[in-house]
Image: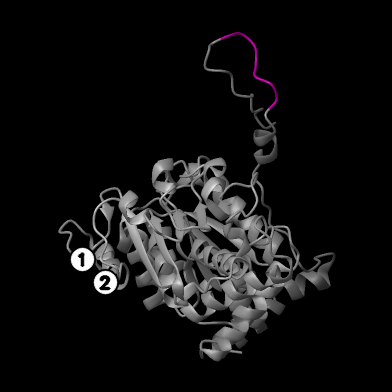
Amino acid sequence: MAAEIVNPRSDSGTEGEEPFDPAFALHRGGKMAVRATVPVRDRDDLSLAYTPGVAKVCSAIAERPELVHDYTWKSQVVAVVTDGSAVLGLGDIGPEASLPVMEGKAILFKQFGGVDAVPIALDCRGVDEIVETVVRLAPSFGGVNLEDISAPRCFEIERKLQERLDIPVFHDDQHGTAVVTLAALRNACQLTGRPLGQLRAVISGAGAAGVAIAKILVEAGIGDVAVCDRKGVVSADREDLTDVKRQLAGFTNKAGFTGSLESALSGADVFIGVSGGTVPEAAVATMAENAMIFAMANPNPEIHPEVAHKYAAVVATGRSDYPNQINNVLAFPGIFAGALQVRASAITEGMKLAAAEALAAVVADELAADCVIPSPFDERVAPAVTAAVAAAARAEGVARR
């Protein structure tokens, strides 16, 4: 008989249990299971699903390896890989504690994109250890979604895996956030009548998400963007930059800002927060008229929506209880579904831009200050992103069917 899980008690030490917690009830026993897609009802079914029938299929794949996509689940399943070092707002909690999040990611893949996914939590931290482990697991999967791996290791891990594998490798903390941010910003531009090329943005946070957002905004043609870390603007004159930040300084901050985030924010059209912390209202007040504020830290945005609405024409957060939620689930299921549909060998910048454009277009006829991005439950989202990504993969020559 399975052991019963007792509801957590309060920290006060008082007698009795806390009221029933629905989060524990939902997660009990995990959130996933394996389900067969073919019946095994009798001897004939068994002989086809397993021996001897399976040997014919194995032999065919051995002779023509590309048939693995047709006769196994490879072409429709993604590995969700983490080391548990940078989980949500929880930080470094290790592989076992990360599993509830990875299971959650996997069911979102299925629910919103029709893509099967398997959570894989690795008990190793070295860049090369993780890379070698994933490379050896890769034959079972059509794509790899890296998740909750701390910066700057995440950049190198993704790069090395992309070099060694011929399947899509996508670090969602970077690129999913970037795609959804760009989509929302495109619609905010449309709503306020300003072209992206005339905007100056300030990003708070030079980690995985901040770097990827800066890259996609530059690729999309934004006027200028300055990225800030704890020490201020990432600028070429600083001597304390990591290799990633040194590269970042090379393609951002054309205006040459130095010093604090607050100083860079003066006259800026766009604020994008992916760092936590708090931006003083006095600094927010110095932004350009009809500013756009995307304060995405959870649970506490860098600029509270009540403050942001005093100065901004469009406000977005990472929270589900405010309008315009910048939520990665709007991007990664459709991106992988599109890539897998055409058996793409990689996810390119062009595919990410196509995803952002398709996502923005979903609500193009419904634009309002509280609607610059679709709801995660909008059934139009995944099909639109899937189709756009598949088309872009073909256009960029990475599709294999």
Q: Quadrant of residue 199?
A: bottom left
Q: Position of residue 125 (x, y in %)?
A: 34, 53
The answer to whether residue 236 is left or right of residue 122 is left
The residue lying furthest to the front in this view is 289
Horizontal and vertical percent for residue 182? 52, 67
Q: Residue at image x 66%, y 55%?
A: 370
**Marks 2 & 1, CB-CB < 8 Å contact:** yes
Query: What is the magenta range?
Result: 14-20
Left or right of residue 17: residue 131: left
Instruction: Report crowding for label 2: few under 14, some 14 to 19, many 20 or more residues within 10 A (C-alpha).
Output: few
Picture coordinates of residue 29, whole percent (x, y): 66, 41
User: Is residue 44 something that shows in the picture?
Assistant: yes
Residue tagged 2: 250
Disc 1 designates what residue? 236
Quadrant assignment, res 218:
bottom left
Q: Position of residue 281 (x, y in %)?
A: 43, 41
Q: Nearer the viewer, residue 144 or 337?
A: 337
Residue nearest the observer in this picture, 189 or 163: 189
Residue 18 colored in magenta in the image: yes
Q: Is residue 393 magenta?
A: no
Looking at the rendered image, the quarter that the N terminus falls into is top right
Name above or below for residue 153 compared with residue 62. Answer: above
In the image, residue 334 sits, relative to residue 343, either above or below, namely above
